[in-house]
Image (cartoon, rainbow, N blue to C red):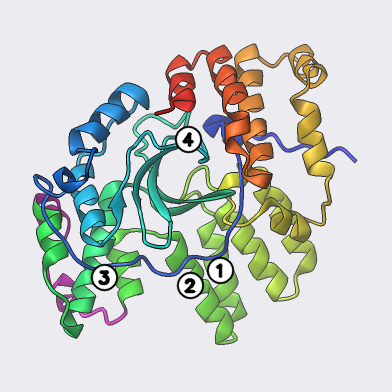
Amino acid sequence: MRVGVVTASRCAFASALPNFRIKPGIRCSSSLSPSTSIATAPTTTTSDYISFIKDVAAARPPEHLPYLLNILQTRGETIVSPGAKEGLIPLVIPLSESSSGTLTSLLRWPTSPPGMEMPVVEVHKHGVWLLANNVDQFIHRILVEEDASNHQGSNDRLWDASSDAGRKLYKKRDLVESGIADVDTYLLKKVGLFPDLIERKASCHLEKGDQVSALVTGEFYTRNHFPGFGRPFIFHAELLLKVGRKLEAKDAARGALKSPWWTLGCTYQEAAEIAEWEDEQIEYIKEKVTEEGKQEDLKKGKAPEQVALDEAAFLLDLASVDGTWDEAVDQVAECYRVAGLNDIARFILYKE
């Protein structure tokens, strides 16, 4: 059975892939200062990141990226080269690696809307997990959680590391002075929306037996708060399945699979199981990237540039199933070149 999946939103972001489960709260700990911290990394400096983002990724560097790098290093993470992309989904710019091997990175959408900032993500074998919509939001959250932990005798190293950015984004003790007892509630009201917090909120409602509130929260999650990401939709499908609404869950999962598979926060196989699809979706996409499939789209009047963008997205979808990113890089880059996105093609191909 052939299953169609192309949507305007998918093509707008022109990417694809999946795998992993709901993430715990963001880790917090210590700190330094942007002028000195990154200099302690053996070969990578703040200017290396700025240059890489401008010259290789063809993007605007986040204003407070140096402070985030400093905070990450202060938390005990190892700063890594922005060009160390081998084996990773080729759309990310690595920042740091935790002791458990998790990479915190920036995501460079190939065709993001004007003015959209690069999201902060964790990189996994089959995709990425969204940590924050932008660098400032991520720093802000870290400082709030650090402020909350100060009651347990935490020190001020992270505050020192955040320096000017910290003073601009968050006033120390505002959490306590706000009168909001729950940290998650404060973050959602005062800082921004975060996928793991929304999922935790919905799961808590469900654990308390409040199915209506859980489903309302799940539906809220899907309202384009995280453009380009399929995770909200597959989570909503999971909620529907848990409350016995199997048919709605199936439809929601099929809708989720219209997003890039690497943004689902689970494997393709997990999403396909809820959607009650076996391999037909994969076979459909494999057909779309054949010469016959591309010619069929052209005959339907689709512009060659759009066909190339679709092909890039489909190739990334297929690579995400097994996490075989390096095998797809050359072909994906060629698609972006054909689509006229030469800067993105060079970024995709970049190797240290």
First to last magenta residue range:
164-182
Residue 171 makes an appearance in the image: no
**Are the residues at dot 2 and dot 3 in contact (C-beta closer than 8 Å)?**
no
The quadrant holding residue 151 is bottom left
Q: Earlier in the sequence, mark 2 or mark 3?
A: 3
Mark nearer the viewer, 4 or 2: 4
Report x, y in % for residue 118: 37, 40
Report x, y in % for residue 117: 34, 39
Q: Earlier in the sequence, mark 4 or mark 2?
A: 4
Q: Which residue is mark 4?
A: 91
Report the quarter where the C terminus lies.
top left
The quadrant holding residue 116 is top left
The disc placed on residue 216 is 1
Q: CA distance from mark 4 to mark 3?
A: 29 Å
Q: CA distance from mark 2 to mark 1?
A: 13 Å
- Residue drawn at point x = 24 percent, y = 48 percent: 69
The disc placed on residue 145 is 3
**Are the residues at dot 1 and dot 4 in contact (C-beta closer than 8 Å)?**
no
The quadrant holding residue 149 is bottom left
Identify which amino acid the numbered label 2 is placed on: Arg
The foreground one among 186 and 348 is 348
Residue 165 colored in magenta in the image: yes
Identify which amino acid the numbered label 1 is placed on: Val
Q: Earlier in the sequence, mark 3 or mark 1?
A: 3
Report the quarter where the N terminus lies.
top right
In this view, 251 is above or below 238: above
Residue 162 makes an appearance in the image: yes
Q: Earlier in the sequence, mark 1 or mark 4?
A: 4
Q: Which residue is mark 2?
A: 200
Q: Secondary structure at mark 2?
A: helix
Mark nearer the viewer, 3 or 1: 3
In this view, 199 is above or below 310: below
